[in-house]
Image (cartoon, rainbow, N blue to C red):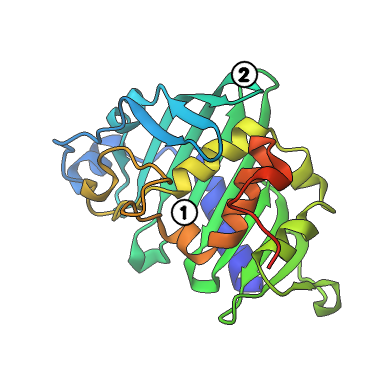
Amino acid sequence: MKSLLSASVLALMALGCDDGADESAADAAVPPVTDKLDTGGTYFESLTLGAKVTGLEELGESIEYAPDGSIELDGEAVVEIEGQGKRAVLMLLSFDTVANGGRQTLLTVDLETDEERVMHYEPEDNALVIGDMEGGVFLFGNPDGSYDVVTSLFEEDVDDALFEHAEDGYAAWQLLQEYNQFTSTSNFSLMLAYAAAQRLAPDARGIGELSGPKAVDSPSSPGDPICRAFADLCDCIACQASGKGAACSLCEAP
């Protein structure tokens, strides 16, 4: 737990600060980006969820490499949810190199409410966090498909007795209803996070794998490592965001 929290706070701090490093030195260390990601058109669409994400043409054009090989992208999405309308949501994506742990961080800002959420994935611990820059709800995926859930600050040691156990993703999703960091999150931010998690994570040393739209309803479209590791949980979160509730076939009690 402690290693995850330490790694997380470093990754999150990287999203919101400029260390003033010599830009010319950074440019010399990183090869120029000659190819852009194709994120135009429909970024994500699901008939099952009644959701569609568009307007992210600038996401692919914004890609920047850091001297360590990690990459960052940002863009403004138009998120449409059947029965809820449409809303603009800002997204900032950060991908570390495999050598540095491969962590992935998504910051969303609902531009109607100015609500910010940070969703962070740590492959080494197979853990997902939903919250803000200081901490949030941590979900650890276990090899048997179960989850351990706890709320914490990033720099805080957590008593093992505070962890709640869930037998599967459906049960973990139900546990999330107890945490304000999750329940107060905009449905539009949650749907955008789900959309991003359906796409292949780019290799931080290359960008080819993120090209082209991915539709969750297509069985040939693989999700990225986040929703492969948290498939049942991801689907239930998306169903909640869609507003379909029990009528959503992606999230059913086992």
Kind of residue sitting beneath label 1: Gln
Task: Identify the residue at the far left of this view.
Answer: 34
Q: How many marks?
A: 2
Taking the image as shown, residue 244 lies to the left or right of residue 40, namely right
Query: Mark 2 belongs to which amino acid?
Result: Gly
69 left or right of 118 in image: left
Which residue shows up at 48% across the image and 29% down it? 52
Q: Quadrant of residue 242?
A: top right
Residue on which disc 1 sits: 104
Q: Nearer the viewer, residue 239 or 89?
A: 239
Q: Nearer the viewer, mark 2 or mark 1?
A: 2
Q: Is residue 233 visible?
A: yes
Which numbered tag is attached to residue 206?
none
Q: Quadrant of the C terminus?
A: bottom right
Q: Secondary structure at mark 2?
A: strand
Say what secondary structure mark 1 lies in: strand
Q: Nearer the viewer, residue 177 or 5?
A: 177
Q: Position of residue 162 (x, y in %)?
A: 85, 72
Which residue, given by chain and number where applicable, does mark 2 sit on? Answer: 85
- Residue 127's x, y, as percent? 58, 65
Q: In the displayed structure, would residue 207 be above or below residue 17?
A: below
Is residue 155 among the parts visible in the rendering?
A: no
Residue 220, how many percent across, how many down? 31, 54
- Residue 114: x percent and y percent? 67, 23
Q: Earlier in the sequence, mark 2 or mark 1?
A: 2
Q: Alpha-carbon distance for marks 2 and 1?
A: 29 Å
Q: Residue at x 71, y 62 (%)?
A: 253
Q: Residue at x 66, y 50 (%)?
A: 130
Q: Residues within 10 Å of mark 2 (few under 14, many from 20)?
A: few
